[in-house]
Amino acid sequence: MPLTRPTILIALPVELLELILSHLPRRADLFSLAQTSRYLHCVIVPGHLYIREIQADLDDAVWTLLALRPYLAARVHRIDIRTAHRKRWGYTALLNEMYSISGTPQGSADKGTWLVKAIPNMHNLRRFSFDHTGTHANLNPNGLFQSLGIASSFLEKVELRIGGSFDASSLKTFILTVTSLPSLATTRSSVFAPIFDMLQSNPNLERLEIDCLAYGPRADLSTPLASLRLHHLRRVLLQGNLQITPQALCDFLAHHQGIEDLSLPATTDVLIPSILSLRPILLGSPPVCRYFSLSSPVSSTFGRKNLVRGGQNLTLRWRRLEQSVRGREAQESEMSRLSGLQEDAESTMGAVVGASPIGQGVDGYFRGFKVPEMPKAPESDECCMSGCAVCVYDLYDESMTTYRASVEVLRIQLADAHIPEIDWPSSVRLEQKRVNAVGGGAGDSRSAALSAFEQLEITLANKRKGQADEPTASAPSV
């Protein structure tokens, strides 16, 4: 829809502009949309400045604005700080038209100062991403982590890169990966200390994974790990080039009784002391953790033999022991017996299926059509042979006549429905009709008693007729 006046968009609700943002290739907020063109900038910035996602450098003017305007900082949900961002319009040019912040110093000495001041005001911050490399390498992270600890009520995910790679994935699942750090242990400790201080202020942390891939002296986590108090912690994974004293590890486990999965670095100088010191805790009543593993294959074998393992199914264990003791012949005989039972079951099932009418459905229906049931012929002892007015055989004949008429109607219905004759029930097929017509099939067959009785009735009828005609033929003519 062409718009001639930019002021028309100012009256639009912010939800409509967010709907327009949802169709863009990269999801952004209104503040990022304002950077795409000068036309949108003139409309969005005066009327709809809701900063929710920020992608900027560390020395950008937006951090000064958020530090000086706490009500704007409270709306921020995501921060992404990188060394360089390609943007058509800078934040400074956009914000100077609304706020007088051009006079604020933004020198390299103040790099990160306004960011640290603005973060405590971001009470709704959900995600924080920070690249601490290149020109930002001289920033002291202590103030940054302390600010994140203050504003971490809703913080869900933290992504950091410090000296090469420092990644964290949510404060409920905090994953820390350190690579390419300086080879001095003191430098590593200075990096880890503020991180653990920030973790301490997040009691909802459930998962902690630390993997140090840097070469050189091992990073010592004994002091920060022993001082950590996270009551909801369930899983701890420590691996890589790390160093932890057994006493610090015991203090850590003693204050975290809810840990269910524990993995430790299998360094040779702390392996045996750690296991010996952990035995009173891991084998206590109740045990502290359910799963324990070491990152070294040799050490994991030692740990499985000496440490607590999970429960097992005793029935399956007994079967395994029984099969290992029994001979091969006994197992083969058992297999043959089971295969025989299976064949008997299949034959029984086949007999049951074969006994039912072919193609006939459940309750005498086939493809939705009612299949007439053939009348049952009377037994030989049901007829008294006394010449009753209503004989059971007369009733049977009437039932057979009705049955044949119903079968003819069903054949017409199946033919109109274009159902192949081969799928019809066996009692309805035309082939069965021809067989009955030629050989007097099962439907028209009579018992021997019925045939003899009918023959006797015919003979007696002929005899009575002959006796009635005999006096007339022997009478003299007048």
Image: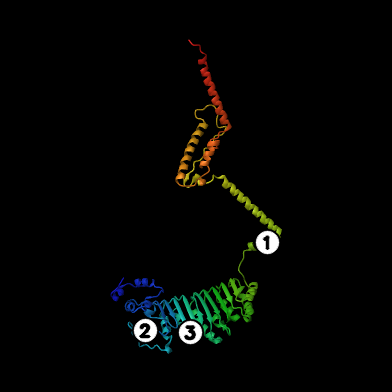
Give the labeled residue for mark 1. 323
Image quarter of the N terminus? bottom left
Residue at 63% across / 50% down in the picture? 344
Q: Is residue 456 visible?
A: yes
Q: Nearer the viewer, residue 350 or 475?
A: 475
The percent coordinates of residue 123 (x first, y second) are 41, 77
Q: Quadrant of residue 327?
A: bottom right
Q: CA distance from mark 2 to mark 3?
A: 23 Å
Q: Looking at the image, is 332 positioned above or below residue 134?
A: above
Q: CA distance from mark 1 to mark 3?
A: 62 Å
Pick out the residue farthest to the top. Answer: 478
Secondary structure at numbered mark 2: helix
Please rate how many residues cluster around mark 1, counting C-alpha atoms within 10 Å: few if below 14, some from 14 to 19, many from 20.
few
Give the labeled residue for mark 3. 133
Comparing labels 1 and 2, the label whose residue is closer to the camera: 2
Q: Amino acid at mark 3?
A: Thr
Q: Amino acid at mark 1?
A: Gln
Count of numbered labels shown in the rendering: 3
Q: Nearer the viewer, residue 124 or 19?
A: 19
The percent coordinates of residue 457 (x first, y second) are 54, 26
Give the labeled residue for mark 2. 92
Q: Is residue 251 visible?
A: no
Residue at 46% across / 42% down in the picture? 412
Q: Looking at the image, is 34 positioned above or below residue 103?
A: above
Q: Looking at the image, is 346 positioned above or below residue 77?
A: above
The tag earlier along the polypeptide, 2 or 3, is 2
Whether residue 189 sits left or right of residue 48 in the image: it is right
The percent coordinates of residue 198 (x first, y second) are 49, 80
Q: Quadrant of residue 293?
A: bottom right
Secondary structure at numbered mark 1: helix
